[in-house]
Amino acid sequence: MNLLKPLTATPSDKKVYIETYGCQMNVNDSEVVLSILQDCGYRYTEQIEQADLILANTCSIRDNAEQRIWGRIDQFHLQRKKRPVIVGILGCMAERLKEKLIENGKVDIVVGPDSYRKLPELLKAAQEGQKGVETTLSREETYAELTPTRLDKNGVSAFISIMRGCNNVCSYCVVPYTRGAERSREPGSIVREACQLFENGYREVTLLGQNVDSYHWKSEGQDVDFADLLEKVAQINPLLRVRFSTSYPSDISDKLLKVMASYDNICRHIHLPVQSGSNPMLEKMRRKYTREWYLERVAAIRREVPGCSLTTDIIAGFCGETEQDHQDTLSLMEEVGYDFAFMFQYSERPGTLAARKYEDDVPAKVKTQRLEEIIALQMKKSEERYASMVGTEQLVLVEGPSKKGEGQLCGRASNYMMCVFPDKQHTAGDYVKVKVVGATPATLLCELV
Ligand code: SAH
Ligand code: SF4
Ligand code: F3S
């Protein structure tokens, strides 16, 4: 390589288009990728027809997520027939499938989640016709000092990755293979990023990790756990709301709940994925808690952080799941009363422990039926939970105009429920007090107080 020729020599009229799939961490990764690309002369475009570089930041969590990407790759290929375009696949599917993604001749570069700093090099080679695959996982990379180029539309709420990877080995899950080992990001860089966002007008940050409760930074006299970090971010300014996701049930600590209770700007919402309400299933899934432990944590949350809303993830039809196991999930849902849930059918992922060890033996029809029952129950619970808010007052952070109609604004209550209300005085980033006058299973209908 000619070291005298900087990698930033790409002409500045090059445009990059990026599609993001999967979790919020992936959205944040796309923002990191854009920041790296802007430093080497690319400008962001929302129009695929204008792009010189088309990227998809992908997800492998379920088979249907990957099937969707294969479909997109065909679509990207149509663009190539019109003009010279580089096509790149990033993220978890890049990490999982590596060279397989370039075999059909439709993809030029494949870059895994820990290799985004290599993008300028790979792009330069791709411009010279050389395909590239870079999927080395790292034990250190956290992109700590990079300032993500924000992709959010409202300029009010942003995501901050506080850690990468995952050290759990849930038997169904591909993430430890696609994202590598867990590592925490230096706390100073997290606080600086949140401060900067606040100064730029943002009023809400969400701290992201696959298991935020195991965040731990230890070096040179510093020993910072997640509760400490959350407190540091909450102290930046009372007008900066702080959220976090995801909490792993066996790691959520009393110390964390106490910190939440002490700061009004730490939002009253915990996403606490249960996956199943059956102990034999939880054990097979290698989740490190029992139904009883989970319910005890829920009780602790209700006790320490009154009014805290709970949301969850549920998998229907995991290997060997019996009707009784399924009923246990329904009864747990009934008992907890989640505000919202992400609900999925089990999808076997190659290479995971479950794929190697257990038969994916619940028939598709049964999986579908169980999932439908889970969704129907959740719908009923959401309806109850939202209806129970009628008559209460909520502090809403305005996100902008609502799609529900002219003259209506929307924003979330501290407990994450979406509020809609007629209002002509306020704009995105304002805090407003509202009274809840009606509810649907996913929205609170409000009036200004
Ligand atoms: N780290 C988070 C989950 C990240 S993945 C946690 O442990 O809670 C998001 C959700 O996808 C999981 O909570 C799980 O419900 C679902 N999921 C993961 N692997 C899956 C699979 N193989 N089939 C179906 N759903 C899956
Ligand atoms: Fe996957 Fe489990 Fe890690 Fe969540 S905690 S990312 S489900 S392995
Ligand atoms: Fe998907 Fe990877 Fe996130 S598999 S859910 S994009 S960590």
Image (spheres, rainbow, N blue to C red):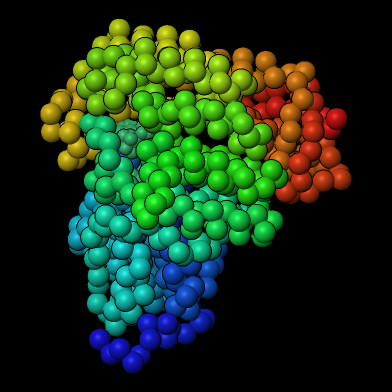
Q: Residue at x 68, y 17 (%)?
A: 387
Q: Relative to 323, is 419 above or below?
A: below
Residue 237, image x, y percentages = 67, 47
Q: Is residue 156 above or below residue 337?
A: below
Q: Residue furthest left?
A: 357
153 and 53: which is toward the camera: 153
Residue 152 location, x and y as percent?
58, 54
Is 5 located above or below residue 129 in the figure? below
Q: Residue at x 54, y 28 (%)?
A: 258
Q: Position of residue 35 (x, y in %)?
A: 48, 67
Q: Point out residue 436 in the picture as x, y percentages from the top left corner.
A: 76, 24
Please indicate whether residue 92 sits to the left or right of residue 203 in the image.
left
Front-most of 188 and 342?
188
In the image, is 389 to the left or to the right of 314? right
Quarter holding ligand 2? top left
113 versus 289 height, above or below: below
